[in-house]
Image: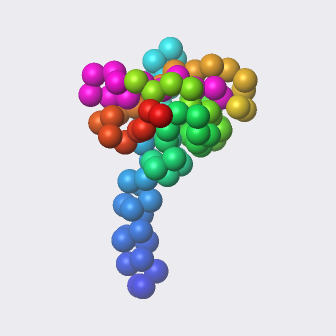
Amino acid sequence: MKKLILITILFPMTAALAWDGIEPSSGTKIEITSRLSKVKKGNTVEIFDHGKNEYHEIEIDRISSHGRDVKFEVYDKDTGEERVFIMEGARKQATAS
């Protein structure tokens, strides 16, 4: 019973750490799974690519506003590709330095 209570409390906390978005060129859902405090220009963060069902490390090249959302131009270290993501939510979650 204690285990169930602990899971019930911790699950929403871990789910809240992901930041949802899409890759507009393919319509693929993307989640930034790294701590949001690390999401800034020049940093390497981890994403989960739902289209390929795998994790990737990306380096953030550019961050810009895209209406209410945030646009990331990134370099995917695992595939060697330049990619663009539109992440849901306010710009305050990302730091362009």
The magenta stretch spans which residues? 65-76
Its colouring scheme is rainbow
Q: How far across and how far down the image is residue 92, in percent?
A: 32, 40
Picture residue at 46% right of the left edge, 50% below the top: 37
Q: Left or right: where does residue 80 sit relative to residue 64?
A: right
Picture residue at 32% right of the left edge, 28% below the top: 69
Which image quadrant is residue 56 in? top right
Q: Nearer the viewer, residue 48 or 70?
A: 70
Q: Nearer the viewer, residue 93 or 49?
A: 93
Q: How far across and how far down the image is residue 5, in percent?
A: 38, 78
In reply to whether residue 67 is colored magenta, the answer given is yes
Q: Main secondary structure of the magenta part?
A: strand
Q: In the rendered image of this protein, does residue 25 appear above or below residue 12?
A: above
Q: In the rendered image of this protein, does residue 64 appear above or below residue 59?
A: above
Confirm whether residue 42 shows in the render.
Answer: yes
Confirm whether residue 89 shows in the render.
Answer: no
Residue projecting furthest to the bottom: 2
In which quadrant is the N terminus drawn? bottom left
Q: Left or right: where does residue 91 sit relative to residue 15?
A: left
Residue projecting furthest to the top: 25
Picture residue at 39% right of the left edge, 62% below the top: 13
Q: Nearer the viewer, residue 48 or 83?
A: 83
Q: How far across and how far down the image is residue 42, in percent?
A: 58, 34
Which image quadrant is residue 12 in? bottom left
Which image quadrant is residue 87 in? top left
Q: How far across and how far down the image is residue 78, in percent?
A: 72, 32
